[in-house]
């Protein structure tokens, strides 16, 4: 008997793990609760001198303006220090 593989189930991959790691850093650095919605996306960067891809993090705290953190580079290359620097969150 073969095991059924659901083709619609989300796939755990390196970017999913990295996304979770980045969200953890943002929550820690900004002292956010676990239920504060965060978004992470890799987008084409059109600014002069910017790498082709940038990682954009959205912090969607209810009742507050959306905070956008932009890190120049791919999601897989983002470090905790990159987020601190991009959001001026150095402690």
Image (spheres, rainbow, N blue to C red):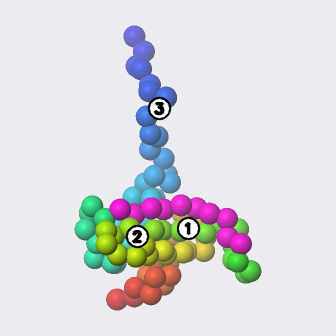
Sequence-first tag of 3 and 1: 3
The reply to whether the magenta stretch includes residue 81 is no
Q: Which label lies toward us, 2 or 3?
A: 2
Residue under the image location 70 percent in, 77 percent down? 47
Q: What element carries label 2?
A: strand
Q: Is mark 1 on a helix, strand or loop?
A: strand
Magenta: main secondary structure equals strand
Q: Distance between the residues labelled 3 and 1?
A: 26 Å
Q: Residue furthest right?
A: 48
Q: Residue furthest top?
A: 1
Residue under the image location 73 percent in, 81 percent down? 49
| Residue 25 appears anywhere in the view | no
User: What residue would you read off at disc 2?
Assistant: 59
Residue under the image location 58 percent in, 61 percent down? 42
Towards the viewer: 50 or 79? 50
- In the rendering, at what x and y percent does residue 75 appear? 54, 63
Q: Mark 2: give few (<14), some (14-19) or many (20+) Cα within 10 Å.
A: many
- In the rendering, at what x and y percent does residue 53 appear? 65, 66
| Residue 8 appears anywhere in the view | yes
Q: Is mark 3 on a helix, strand or loop?
A: loop
User: What residue would you read off at disc 1?
Assistant: 55
Mark 1 and mark 3 in contact (Cβ < 8 Å)? Answer: no
Query: In the rendered view, would you say 30 is above or below 23?
Result: below
| Region in magenta | 37-46
Residue under the image location 50 percent in, 81 percent down? 86
Instruction: Name the image quarter holding the N terminus.
Output: top left
Query: In the rendered view, would you say 7 is above or below 84?
Result: above
Q: Is residue 81 left or right of residue 29?
A: right
């Amino acid at each position: 008997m073969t095991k059924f593989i659901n083709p619609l189930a989300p796939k755990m991959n390196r970017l999913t793990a990295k996304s979770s790691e980045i969200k953890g850093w943002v929550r820690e650095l900004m002292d956010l609760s676990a239920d504060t919605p965060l978004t992470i996306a890799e987008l084409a960067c059109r600014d002069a001198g910017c790498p082709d891809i940038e990682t954009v993090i959205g912090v969607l705290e209810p009742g507050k303006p959306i905070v956008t953190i932009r890190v120049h580079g791919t999601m897989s290359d983002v470090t905790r220090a990159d987020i601190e620097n991009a959001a001026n969150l150095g402690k």
